Amino acid sequence: MKLAVVGAGLVGLMTAAGFAELGHRVVCCDSDAGTIGLLARGIVPYREPSLEPIVQRNVSAGRLRFGEEPEEIMRNAEMVFLAVNTPSADDGQLQLAPLWAAADKLGEWSDGTRRIVGILSTVPVGTAERLEARLRARLPAHCGVDVASLPAFLREGYAVRDFFEPARIVIGTASSEAAERLDLLHQRLPGPIVHADRRSAELSKMAANAHLALKISFANELAALAEQTGADYPAVAQLIGLDPRIGPHYLGAGLGFGGSCLPKDARALVRLADEAGAPQTLVSAAIRANAMLPLRMVRKLEAALSGPSRRKVALLGLTFKPGSEDLREAPSLRLIAELLRRHPGITLTAYDPAAGAPAIRHALPSAVQLCDSAEEALTGADAAILVTEWPEFRKIPAEDYKNWMNRPIILDGRNALDAAALNAQGIVCIGVGRLPATPAEPQPVHPMRLAENA
Ligand SMILES: NC(=O)c1ccc[n+]([C@@H]2O[C@H](COP(=O)([O-])OP(=O)(O)OC[C@H]3O[C@@H](n4cnc5c(N)ncnc54)[C@H](O)[C@@H]3O)[C@@H](O)[C@H]2O)c1
Ligand SMILES: O=c1ccn([C@@H]2O[C@H](COP(=O)(O)OP(=O)(O)O[C@H]3O[C@H](CO)[C@@H](O)[C@H](O)[C@H]3O)[C@@H](O)[C@H]2O)c(=O)[nH]1
């Protein structure tokens, strides 16, 4: 088939490259000339494992092209996919201006066939209907068009796997003809294809992300309860996760959820629900609980370290999750803001394996000294906070922590380290939802006791 994708961010590019890999002829365009210039040379302008070779292979094979004028797109493609950004407004609503702008630039066709326009972007319920009405009002009568909702469920860092091995493919349509054609397009992908009406498909996307947010906030509140009651949260998570009705995923406690999707989509669901008169109080609470986590971590630091204001604290990891160079709504930024608010005199160093990415340097407050290695960040530090669970942090030997740091105290904000092994080697390592075991006193002690002893 001949396809077009508008928007060459992660969703658009993955979709364009993925369908090209499956043998379709795809053109991908973006309003950002710099992005298109790089892609035309086979350079993917962001970190996404395994995507670049797929792009390069399909460009070389002539199945994937970049940069066609938007007006040409409808004329040359049987199906067009819109994958533009839909950012949050201050009130949580998703901004659809990029979607309308992209749609309004699409040209016409004259061969009498019906084109399909699929919305891959995350949008409020009813957007597909609004877009169809908008296109129909503009297009001449002979240009039949069906707008479909095709929500994307890709994760950053796993986009290639999620595209080629999807957990589900949701096809939201209002016509059986469009449903059949989209079925055909997706038939070489292994995931189950689920047909739905467009509104249900749209709501399912926001609901999926909001549910993940709920699970994470539940995990974090339970971890706090475990700390207060002497239980071990990772053990609790493992035990409840064995129940197939609950499952082991998204029960990881720590500094909470961030990134370009979960926070934005949870807010958008709350906003949509308020407008619709069906408030989502649970999701609202999950957002509030998530916002409290940096303060909780700062309080732990205060308990572990007397007078943090005059101390040097190293942050290990900055990105919203490992394997990414994305700082959008990253918990690290909220943590840094809270540390500086409560302890203006604190010295903060930070290291992230993706620290070379210009986006990171750009987004980081100037008060934080960005380092080129974990050693540089940890040298002379009075405490470290592990913020993002990059695998390389697990490989730092206990001896290095002891040699580099002024005092080897680690607050493991993702339960990524082997706390027992570190404790056994003379390092104070305090996880989330776990009672700290100190080298001097191997029996569990309450964090307040640590402060008293400091
Ligand atoms: N990133 C993810 O992991 C992910 C996963 C599933 C769904 N989503 C959703 O998919 C959508 C896209 O996400 P993304 O991460 O790819 O976004 P992104 O911001 O990385 O990329 C969007 C691209 O669209 C381009 N664009 C904006 N307006 C345009 C226009 N009028 N014409 C042509 N190009 C235009 C931008 O220049 C940008 O390159 C969002 O709604 C997002 O919520 C994202
Ligand atoms: O047990 C967990 C799991 C995740 N997180 C955090 O949750 C955030 C989101 O993680 P993840 O879901 O891997 O990130 P995204 O790549 O943003 O993917 C989400 O958002 C995408 C965009 O909508 C969807 O397509 C995906 O299905 C959905 O997982 C990150 O800050 C993680 O650190 C936790 O705190 N605990």
Image (cartoon, rainbow, N blue to C red):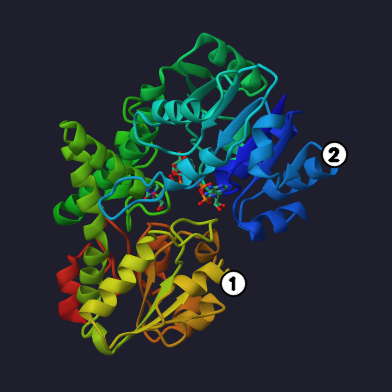
Q: Secondary structure at mark 2?
A: loop
Q: Residue at x 21, y 59 (%)?
A: 292
Image: 135 above or below 335: above
Q: Quadrant of residue 158?
A: top right
User: In the drawing, what numbered circle is on residue 61?
Assistant: 2
Q: Is residue 22 left or right of residue 242?
A: right
- CA gap, disc 2 to disc 1? 32 Å
As drawn, the residue found furthest toward the front would be 140
Residue at position x 59%, y 52% in the image: 31
User: As drawn, is 393 to the left or to the right of 188?
Assistant: left
Q: Residue at 35% x, 43% y: name it.
A: 265
The N terminus: image quadrant: top right
Q: Please give the name of the residue rendered at 26% of the width and 72% of the height, measured from the top-left corner.
A: 338
Residue reaching furthest top? Answer: 176
Within 10 angstroms of label 1, few (less than 14), some, or many (20 or more) residues?
some
Q: Is residue 94 visible?
A: yes
21 left or right, relative to 399 = right
Q: Nearer the viewer, residue 357 or 448?
A: 357
Q: Which of the two marks, 2 or 1, is nearer to us in this view? A: 2
Is 41 rendered above or below residue 302?
A: above
Mark 2 residue CB less than 8 A from any atom of ligand 1: no
Task: Identify the residue position indicated by label 1 in the image.
Answer: 356
Inspect the image, locate mark 2, and give the three-letter code of the amino acid beneath it.
Answer: Ala
| Depth check, front residue: 103 or 196 | 103
Point out residue 444 in the picture as x, y percentages from the top left corner.
22, 62
Mark 2 and mark 1 lie on one chain; the one further toward the N terminus is: 2
Residue 69: image x %, image y %? 68, 45
